[in-house]
Amino acid sequence: MINAVMIGLGWWGKHSIDAVKGKSEKINIIGACSRNTEQHSDYLKKNDLKIYNNYEDVLRDDNVHAVILTTPHSTHTEQIIAAASHNKHVFAEKPLTLTKSDAVRCINALKKKNLKLGVGFSRRFQPAYLDLIKMVENGEIGQILHIEGEQSGPSAYKIKDGMWRGKKEESPGGAMAARGTHVMDAMISIAGEVERISCISERRVLDIDLDDTTSMMVKFKSGVSGYLGTIYVTADIWRLQVYGSKGYLLMDSETRLIKKTLDNKEITTNYPSTNIVGLTLEAFADDIEGKGAFPVTNNEAIQGVAAFEAMVKSALNNYEWVSVDNS
């Protein structure tokens, strides 16, 4: 059993605790801390969680094997390097960092101590996605030509001025950090490294200084083309569509997969709701204990951040094509 501490007690931190607390035989969240831990004392006592005064106290606790970061993106680099220096494994919510150079620094610090990294790409654990990957790998839709994806929703309407998610330096590209990055990760898992990106990201509706409408064209080194959209002020949607020379596969929600072939035969499979957040944290624990590799490789984590960084640069430069640094 891996003992972990949650760093950050916003909505997602608590959701992640609830996903495994009392439900998992692989990972046990034994405590938590945040910038305002005392505001969450009732929740922490209810869940029998140790209250840490600060991050340094967590890192000095020999009973802690790993930390889980649901903190502002810009703080991840310092927190991950500090964890590595104290021999703690790290699970970080996405994006891992905001620049490729920082992602490399983090991963090198962990590798030097033979420590594991998990990144919160929970959509990799959706049964529909897993079946989609198997069908792609088995050649059921032929040569992959193009991928389209979207993850959007109305989350930005809840963001108030002063919240860290409402700051452009924490959320460049609007919903990309909170939502769209899941789609980019899925695309990378299918098509490989991104070669270049052209992105438009604008504020159309929000009163706060945060983009709400973001879209991009993507070219992969493999030759596959792609489109990704992520809107912060519309109804919830997840869509991942992979076009091949023999048909296409479409996740038109997180729990439904459609396969359509050249003869226009269509097969739809519906899947039950799955605790993907819990499965992601358990996969991290399995990796620590040598029971199975975490599905997002270190290289893929770096590639995703490099693509994110190129997206930001393109949006700032009138959506010119920007090459992704995959060196």
Image (cartoon, rainbow, N blue to C red):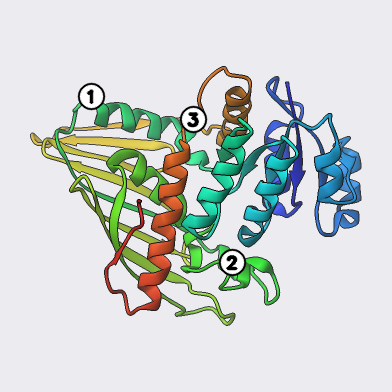
Residue 15: give its label: none
Measure how far apart labels 1 and 3 are at the Cα level: 24 Å
Q: Which residue is mark 2?
A: 170
Any part of residue 277 in sight: no
Q: Which image quadrant for residue 217?
A: bottom left
Crowding at dot 1, Cα within 10 Å, few <14 / some 14-19 / many 20+, comes out as: few
2 or 1: tag closer to the N-terminus: 1
Which amino acid, mark 2? Answer: Glu
Q: Residue at x 61, y 39 (%)?
A: 110
Crowding at dot 2, Cα within 10 Å, few <14 / some 14-19 / many 20+, comes out as: some
1 or 3: tag closer to the N-terminus: 1
Q: Is residue 286 above or below residue 111?
A: above
Task: Give the image location of residue 84, x and y in percent.
Answer: 68, 41
- Residue farthest along the front direction in this orientation: 112
Q: Residue at x 38, y 73 (%)?
A: 315
Of labels 2 and 3, the one closer to you = 2
Task: Give the image location of residue 6, x and y in percent.
Answer: 75, 43
Q: Which image quadrant for residue 128?
A: top left
Which amino acid, mark 1? Answer: Asn
Q: Which residue is mark 3?
A: 272
Measure how far apart labels 2 and 1 are at the Cα level: 39 Å
Task: Give the image location of residue 198, x and y in percent.
Answer: 29, 67
Task: Give the image location of residue 22, x and y in percent.
Answer: 76, 27
Helix, strand or loop status at disc 3: loop
Which amino acid, mark 3? Answer: Pro
Q: Which residue is mark 1?
A: 138
Left or right: 115 in relation to 3: left
2 or 3: tag closer to the N-terminus: 2
Of labels 2 and 1, the one closer to you = 2
Left or right: 319 in relation to 100: left
